[in-house]
Image (cartoon, helix red, strand yellow):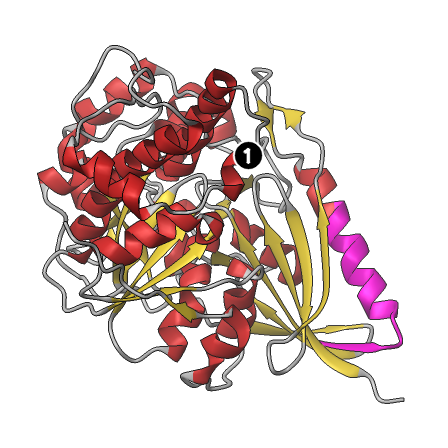
Amino acid sequence: MSKKKVTIVFDIGKTNKKFFLFDKNYKEVVREYTELPLTTDEDGYPTEDLAALQNWIKDNFNAILDDENFEVKAINFSTYGASFVHLDQKGNVLTPLYNYTKPMDQDILDLFYEKHGSKLKIARETASPQTGMLNSGLQLFWLKYKHPEVFKKIRYSLHLPQYLSYLFTGICVSEFTSIGCHTNLWDYDKADYHDWVYDEGIDALLGPIVPTSASINTSYRNKKIKIGVGIHDSSSALLPYILSKKEPFLLLSTGTWSISLNPFNDESLTDEDIENNCLNYMRIDGKRVKASRFFMGNEYKIQVEKLCAYYGKEYGFHREVQFDQDLYLRLMKNKNIYFRFEGIILKRKMITATDLNSFATFEEAYHQLMIELMDLQIHTITNAIGNSEIKNIYIDGGFTDNDVFMKLMSHHFQHYNVMSTHSPLGSALGASMVISNKKIDETFLQQHYQMKVLQPLILNL
């Protein structure tokens, strides 16, 4: 029996760690999920257990090498961003993998802006809304001034995808998608590291920049295997669309965050963009992707829980609600704001408390909630489109199953081709594709993403 040639992808999310095998046509052959328990850093703050992650990766890799059914041709890694692993001269790990939600000391932040420019200036130049540890470059600044004795020992600081690659190759590198995602490291107009990185001597700790499509040929148990250098998960999820679609498009990725990604807008960000939570991601070739995000899924969950409690419904009832055109038209006649949002910082009229007295039923209040979220969604998509010539909008992620959301999208963006896509592979597929030189065509998304064109609503407004 001939062995099936496969590519292994380790797709590491904050919650789920996933392990995939793909065949040469990017068809999923094996998929496994696990959740690993967290550990804590020296301050007791919860964080990824790097040792447990390494062991899980090693065990899965060895099991496939031993499996008579498969021949491993390549491995790659896609992971969340804003996470650095710091190594000493001998390649030993020096610190915990600090969690990007850990609060950063205010005095260190004050020192940074005092030395290197105002918050707004740094945010605009690095296309990174200022968010402490989530700007992973600041983690290095923080280490330098908070733990100088540790900082002095660092030989290389690797973003998480590149560290996982390093485990297999022993080679330290950097690549664009990890450098470019809200790290504060990259000056997009200069197309180089920001001046502060050189002023602080941080550049000396970062590996040489290689293309994201680079791979390193190694030999394991006399088997030749190509090892990728890893990729940031948001850029990876975008890649199958970029490789298979020739016409400009916007990808709306929905979930806890709703992120509008426009790979066809290379304008510099303005002060207003930064205030509207716009940022840049980076394509694998170093070109910028304008993005605009808001905490939609998080807010939706908070508000739906309140609706369920108020109307005496089981949580989950909302998933059955279908779009009701008459209800929608009635609500739009007296359009107003009824919900007080808790986790969204975008500008909107603030009210002191949510008012549900005006809605007789759960369905009516739910439609109103979706109308108010959609107003913000329209705003963030419009920001990301800017003045680029976009005709196609692809929607993926959790909200593709939400009938009210999808109908409202098709209504408000009726001058675009709006398509829903569904792929459980997300960023893993991009990681598999980036190290292969196999060409794909227009039919690729159709086969792998169950694409559906949304029909605009015909409403008598």
Q: Residue at x 52, y 28 (%)?
A: 150
For the N terminus, the image quarter is bottom right
Q: Position of residue 198 (x, y in %)?
A: 27, 44
> Does the stretch in magenta take in 194?
no
Instruction: Tell me which secondary structure the magenta stretch mostly adopts.
Output: helix
Range shown magenta: 55-72
Q: Residue at x 50, y 36 (%)?
A: 318
Structural crowding at the residue carrying mark 1, measured as other residues with C-alpha within 10 Å and reported as few (<14), some (14–19) or many (≥20): few
Q: Is residue 266 visible?
A: yes
**Between 240 and 210, the one nearer to me in the picture:** 240
The residue where tag 1 is placed is 317
Q: Position of residue 296 (x, y in %)?
A: 37, 37
Residue situated furthest bottom in the rendering: 2
Left/right placement of residue 266 relative to residue 50 reads left
**Between 123 and 296, the one nearer to me in the picture:** 296
Q: Residue at x 17, y 49 (%)?
A: 383
Residue situated furthest top in the rendering: 352
Quadrant in which residue 207 is drawn: bottom left
Q: Is residue 184 visible?
A: no
Q: Residue at x 49, y 48 (%)?
A: 398
> Does the stretch in magenta take in 66?
yes
Quadrant in which residue 168 is drawn: bottom right
- Count of marks placed on residues: 1
Left/right placement of residue 58 relative to residue 399 reads right
